[in-house]
Structure formats: structure tokens, C-alpha cells
Image (cartoon, rainbow, N blue to C red):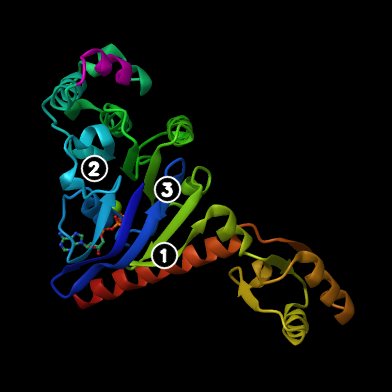
Amino acid sequence: MITVESLTKKYGGFTAVDDVSFTAASGRVTGFLGPNGAGKSTSMRIIVGLTPATSGHATVCGRRYAELPNPGLEVGVLLDASAQHAGRTGREILTVAARTMGLPARRVDEMLDRVSLTPDEAARRVRDYSLGMRQRLGIATALLGDPEVLILDEPANGLDPAGIRWMRDLLRDYADQGATVLLSSHLLHEIEVVADDLVVIGNGRIVAQGTKAELLAAAGTLVRSPELPALATALTDAGLAVTATGSGGASAALRVDAEPDVVGRVALAAGVPLTELRAADGAGLEEMFLELTAETQRETVTEGAAA
Ligand SMILES: Nc1ncnc2c1ncn2[C@@H]1O[C@H](COP(=O)(O)OP(=O)(O)OP(=O)(O)O)[C@@H](O)[C@H]1O
Ligand SMILES: [Mg+2]
């Protein structure tokens, strides 16, 4: 279990992480989702004690990371796969890590096997590794001590589709055996397939959190009509909360906080024809995430213009 309480990180006048609180429970995969620059890596670095927090704190297995006597046996960490020792071979890196943790050498072969790095690949220097191979080696290092908690920052980066599927299955299995898995991504769909719980962060702040089922269910109904303004009026008059969605024109639609049958009845009563009516399945989450992403991009543009 990971507990993060009111974590804040300031760099000068800039707040990278702003009063972030969440827990990642054992037996579950928690997805830490946010656009580029949202504060995911910073939060994770604070959790594993690599960056000091300005205020607030984080515990892993009930203790601060720095207080864990042999952290590798309790927490597997993959932060930056390209930060591994470039001059060492994959096998050397794992061997050194195994020794540090007091693990038998056979554990190295088991892990190489687990992440599908061949003996030939394990004998190559990491500087000659592809990004996907580095990620696999990073995962092998994280799993070495058979830890109860896994903290992985964008582990799917650089993996091909088969590699992404492999990673998902591995994380799922690991959580199913009772471990706590926290993984970050800037891609909603990547996280959506594997996570049980979601923590969504934007501009350093948590904007949504809960079980995936809760966040998806909150999406309501998606409805399209050639007479969208009339439909919006009818729904609003019926006391339902309505949000315009889609990019306008042919893709314009409404998202309604109600079940599809309720929306259908309102449309029927108002005599408005519908071209589509369905549960919005995550459309709300996607919309929120796109808004966050767009905001972040606007900021980047402004910063660029000011420089
Ligand atoms: N050492 C630092 N000094 C100043 N600002 C920093 C530092 N580290 C991070 N930041 C800023 O904090 C913000 C959050 O960065 P962070 O790396 O945590 O984002 P992220 O969510 O991991 O993004 P990405 O998806 O791109 O990896 C960014 O605006 C970044 O520029
Ligand atoms: Mg990051």
C-alpha cells in the first residue's frame, strides 16, 4: 500500500505538485494519469525519496521509503529506464542489484527469463539496448526482490504493441497476487485497460480519482441528433445536466447526466429525432483528460511566446 498525503513540491515560485493525496491499495493496479508536465514523475520521485517534498509526505508499506531497511525487497521501482548504467551489460546490472539486496544469483536468470531478455541480449551493454529492451531490463530490476509494491513511471514507453500487452499481463498478475502496483502514463487508453483505480492529475493537482468503474459510470449518456439545440433545450427543461461534446459539426453530441432510456423518453416527448443514443462509457473521462491536455498545451504556447 502507498499513501500520499498533501504532497506539495515547489521549484522556486512554480508549484509542480500541489497538495496531492491518494492511496494505492494492495491487490490493485492504480493508474496515475496526467498530461505531460502534470507532476507524475515528480510525485513518484518524492514517494521513493529521490526528491524531497516541500510539504506533505508519502509512505510505502506504512513507512517512509528512506526508513525501509532493504527497500528493493519491498518496493520495485522503475523511474527512468534510460538512467541505467550505459557501460554495463544487462546481466551485470541485475547481478549487482541482486547482490545489494542479498539475493541468490539464480534470481538474475529467473528475471531475465521473466522479461524475455535472451542470454545474448543480457550480455550486451545497455548503451546498445533499444528503448524497449531498457524497459524490460528496468522491469526485471524492479521485480528482482519480489517486492510487495511496484512503482513504475511510464513503463510502456518504447514498447511495441506485443510488449505493451505483455507488460499489462505482468502487472495484472502481479496485483492479482496481492501486490500494490502504481503506474503512470500520459495516455488514457493505456491506463484504462489495466488499472482498477485511477488518479488523474493536471497542473500538479488531482482532478479526479476513484475506481475505474466509478469514473466511467459517471459519464452518463451520449446522444446525437440533427436537431441538437432543440434536444439540449428539452433535456435542460427536463432538469437534466447537459454538456456539449465532440468538436462541433457532424461530430457534435451531447453528454447527459442520466440513463439512456431517460434521455430517449425526453427526446420522444419533445419530438426530436435521434441519430445515436448510448451509454457514454468513459467519454466524460476522455473529455476531462483532453481538456487537461489542451490546457497544458496552451500553457506551453504562452511560455514559448513569452521567452
Ligand atoms: N528539477 C526541476 N526544476 C524545475 N522544475 C521542474 C523540475 N522537475 C520537474 N519540474 C517541473 O515540474 C513539472 C512536472 O514535471 P513532471 O516531470 O513531474 O511531469 P510528468 O507528469 O512526469 O510529465 P511527463 O508526462 O512529460 O513525464 C513540469 O512543469 C516540470 O518542468
Ligand atoms: Mg514524467
Name the residue type under label 1: Thr
Q: Quadrant of residue 89?
A: top left
Element carrying mark 1 = helix
Question: Relative to 18, is 224 on the left or the right?
Answer: right
- Neighbor class of circle 1 (other Cα within 10 Å; few <14, some 14-19, many 20+) is many
Expressed as whole percent of the image width and height from the top left, the position of residue 26 reads 42, 43
Residue visible at 43% across and 58% down?
199
Task: Tell me if I can see residue 37 in this picture.
Answer: no
The residue singled out by tag 3 in the image is 25
Instruction: Relative to 265, say whether 120 is above or below.
Output: above
On whether residue 34 falls in the magenta region, the answer is: no
Element carrying mark 3 = loop
Q: Nearer the viewer, mark 2 or mark 1?
A: 2
Name the residue type under label 2: Asp
> How far separated are the C-alphas under marks 1 and 3?
27 Å
Q: Of callouts 2 and 1, which one flags the residue occurring earlier in the amino acid sequence? A: 2
> How far separated are the C-alphas under marks 3 and 2?
23 Å
Instruction: Point out the stretch of residues depicted in magenta.
Output: 103-112
- Neighbor class of circle 3 (other Cα within 10 Å; few <14, some 14-19, many 20+) is many
